[in-house]
Amino acid sequence: MDAMAPVPYRVVGRARETADTITLTLEPVGESIATPRPGQFNMLYAFGVGEVPISVSAIDAGHRLRHTVRGVGAVSQSLCSSEAGTVIGVRGPFGTDWDVESAMGSDVLVVAGGIGLAPLRPVVHELLRSRRRFRRVTVLVGARAPEEIVFRGEVASWQASARISVRTTVDYATAAWKGEVGVVPTLIERVTIDPEVTTVMICGPEVMLRFTAAEVLGRGIAAERVRVSMERNMQCGVGRCGHCQLGPVLVCTHGPVLPWSRVGPLLARREM
Amino acid sequence: MKTIADLIAEEELFQGLDKEALEFVAGCGSNVHFAPEDRILTEGESANTFYLLRSGSVALSFYVPGRGEVIIDTLGAGDVLGWSWLFAPYRWQFDAEARDDVAAVAFDGACLRTKCDSDNHLGYLLTQRFAKVILGRLQAVRLRVLDVYGAGATH
C-alpha cells in the first residue's frame, strides 16, 4: 500500500466528548490500513480542506478506527463536523508506540493533560485488559475545567472500578467538583512512586510535558523510563518532508512516542 | 503511639530543625479532625492557626459573586494549610473546607509568632520553610497562567 495515498474510510459514529472535541468511529469503504498500536497516529484527510495527524484513541477488534479530534483549526474543525456517512481519507498507521509490553512487571504512571488523554486511552485499556501483568498502575488526568475532561464517563468508570488508581484535577472548579484542583504536574508529588521500577507515559501540550517530566525526574525516575508523546507539524508522516523535525529527531518516524532522555534536552533549546 | 514531635519530624516542612526547635514547635501543635464539609478557615477571620494535613482532602475556595464558591486549590496529606498566620494582617485570604474526613496537626500560630519574634533563628528557619511552600504554590499558579492544556494544536 502506498503510504502517501489516503485510504477511504466512512464515518459510522460521532460522539461529542467536550464542547470542541469529537470522537469519530471510522470504517473502511474498501481496503483497510494496518491495525495501529497504542500511541501511533494516522493522517486524517478532510477532502478539499486538508490533512492532520491524529492519534488513535481506541483500538477495536477488526478494521474500525477511533480518533478523537479537537477542533482548533480549519482541518480539525472540518473533521469534527463530519456527520455519519462522510468519507475521509486515512493514511497510516505511523510512528512509534507506547510499547506497553515492555512495562509489564513494573509500576506504570500515566499522566495526561487535556486532549493528551486520547493517545493514552488505548494504553489504559491495555493496562486494564492485562491488569495482573503490571504492578501499581496510576493514571493522572488534568484539564482546564471538569467539563473539558475528555472521556469523562469512562474516566469515572476507571475510578469506580478501583482496579487502578485514577486522580483527576482541573484548573478551576465549583464546589460541585469532587476531584482535585491544580495543574496535573502538582499531583506527581502526591502519588506513591517506586522510582526504580516505574515506567512513566506522558501526553499533553509541550509546556505540560516539560513540567511533568521535571516532577517525575525529581522523584528519582530515570529519564530513560519516561516516555512522552510529541506533537509537531507532521505532514508526510513518513520522514520525508521534514516539517516535524526537532533537531535530529523526525517526530513522525522517530516518534511521536520518545524517551525523555532523547527529547528533553531538545525541548530545552530555544527556536527548535 | 506517636507524639506530635514524632509526627512532625517525619514531615518535609520541619526537616532540618534541631531537636529543641522541633520540641518547641510540637508544643504548639495538637491533633485535630474534621468531618466532610466542616469549615476550617473563613476568609477575613483572624489567622492564628495553621495545619499540617495528615490525611484527607481540603478545598481552598473563594466566593465570587455570580459564580458562587470557586475552588482554587485542593490540598492533601503532607500539605500545609494556611500561611496568613505568619504575615500581617494575620487574616485568612480564602475559605477552606474539608472534603472528606481530615486528620491534621493544628499549630498555634500566635504562639509561634511570639517565639519567632524572640528567637530570630527559629523565625528564619520557619520563614524559610514557609517560603518554600509558598514558592511551590506560586509555581503551580504560574503553570495555570500558562494555560498548559490549551497551548499547542493549531491544525
Image (cartoon, coloured by chain):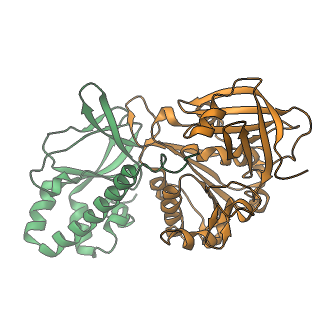
Chain colours: A orange, B green
At 66% from the left and 69% from the top, the residue drawn is A249
Horizontal and vertical percent for residue B112? 15, 61
Figure check: A74 above or below B140: above
Q: Residue at x 30, y 62 (%)?
A: B135
Q: Position of residue A122 (x, y in %)?
A: 72, 45
Q: Quadrant of the C terminus of chain A?
A: bottom right
Q: Residue furthest front?
A: A48
Q: Nearer the viewer, residue B130 or A267?
A: A267
Residue A34 relative to residue A188: left or right: right
Q: Which residue is pictured at 66% across the width and 48% down the height?
A: A120
For residue A156, say whether it is visible. Answer: no
- Measured as percent of width and height from the top left, residue B23 is found at 25, 68
- Regarding residue B153, the answer to whether it shows in the image is yes
- Which image quarter: residue B2? bottom left
Q: Is residue B34 above or below residue B139?
A: above
In depth, the one of B89 and B17 nearer the eye is B89
The x and y percentages for residue A132 are 77, 50
Query: Which of B84/A146 is in front?
Result: A146
Q: Is residue A49 left or right of residue B17?
A: right
